[in-house]
Image (cartoon, rainbow, N blue to C red):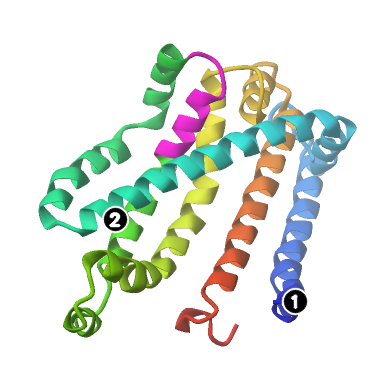
Amino acid sequence: MIRETMKTLKGLPAYVLPPGVALLIAGIVWEAWVRIGDVAEYIVPAPTAIASDLFGDIGQFALHGAVTLGEAAAGFALGATVAIVGAVVMSQSRTLERSLLPLAVLVKVTPIVAVAPLFVIWFGFGSFPKILVASLITFFPVLVNALAGLRSASPEALDLFRSMDASNTEILWKLRAPGSLPYLFAAFRISVPLSVIGAVVGEWFTGDRGLGSVIIVAHNNLDMPRLFAAVAVLAVIGITLTGLTWYAEKRALFWHESERGF
């Protein structure tokens, strides 16, 4: 395990340096454009102004970022758990799938910005409405991928298990569940950043903590450096969570053909 971890860490520069260089070049061009074009700060702030605001109040940004991260993590955990349980239930019966999947689609197509104010009315101004918004936005991708993964077992493997009198529970845990892991991690890579977006949307309506509230206040005050700084912190959170998901996937799916050659 330690050897694999060291191997992964040695390969990080190949993933970090190219986007890092690209961001540096983009920042230089951005700074030059703002200064040469004399662009007003309330329209587009310079990267140096954003960095000054961010590092000048790093404690508050860290505090609000931790709140948003906690809500996003709880929302992802709730949404993914409900989705996986729902996928397991639907995978056992085509009738159940036809009955329940339209309800999941209804949840998917309902605009989050329309639901968030209702959660405030129903559950108050605490963290719970934000967690629910984050769970709703992460629910559908995990459900669809988990269901596809559970149904991806080959007919030959199913026939083999049935020939050995394996029960449905044994088929589920020993065949369907392991085969669904690549599908699940693909869904997690999509849903983890979405959970952050869901938490931020919830914070727009439900309180005075979190990066979403920082963005709303900064927008109302035309404080664009602070707004961009909050967005930058959100980007760091999203990139970090995506990287952790990628690492967990490599650790869990070392046996799968998708990880060969990496």
Q: Where does the image place residue 172, in percent across and percent down from the top left?
A: 30, 66
Count residues near mark 1 (Cα–Cα under 10 Å), then give few for <14, some for 14-19, many for 20+. few
Image quarter of residue 222? top right
Between 42 and 94, the one lying in front of the other is 94
Q: What mark, if any, has residue 88 been given in the picture?
A: 2
Instruction: Indicate the position of residue 147 as horizontal and vertical percent values.
Output: 29, 59
The N terminus sits in image quarter:
bottom right
Residue at screen point 22% across, 39% down: 103
Q: Say left or right for 104 vs 24.
A: left
Disc 2 residue crowd, few under 14, some 14–19, many 20+, Cα 10 Å: many
Relative to residue 137, is residue 24 depicted above or below?
below
Are the residues tagged 1 and 2 within 8 Å (C-beta)? no
Give the x, y percent position of residue 244: 64, 59
Q: Is residue 122 left or right of residue 247?
A: left
Amino acid type of the residue that numbered disc 2 sits on in the rendered structure: Val
Kind of residue sitting beneath label 1: Ile
Q: CA distance from mark 1 to mark 2?
A: 34 Å
Q: Nearer the viewer, residue 104 or 16?
A: 104
| Residue at image location 13% in from the left, 57% down from the top | 94
- Range shown magenta: 124-136
> Height in image: 160 above or below 216?
below
The residue located at (77%, 60%) in the rendering is 25
Query: The residue tagged with tag 2: helix, strand or loop?
Result: helix
Q: Is residue 26 above or below residue 134?
A: below
- On the image, numbered disc 1 is attached to which residue? 2
Counting from the top left corner in percent of width and height, residue 146 is at 34, 59
**Could you tell me which residue is drawn at 70 percent across and 35 percent down?**
65
The residue closer to the viewer here, 94 or 38, is: 94
127 drawn magenta: yes
Which corner quadrant holds the C terminus?
bottom right
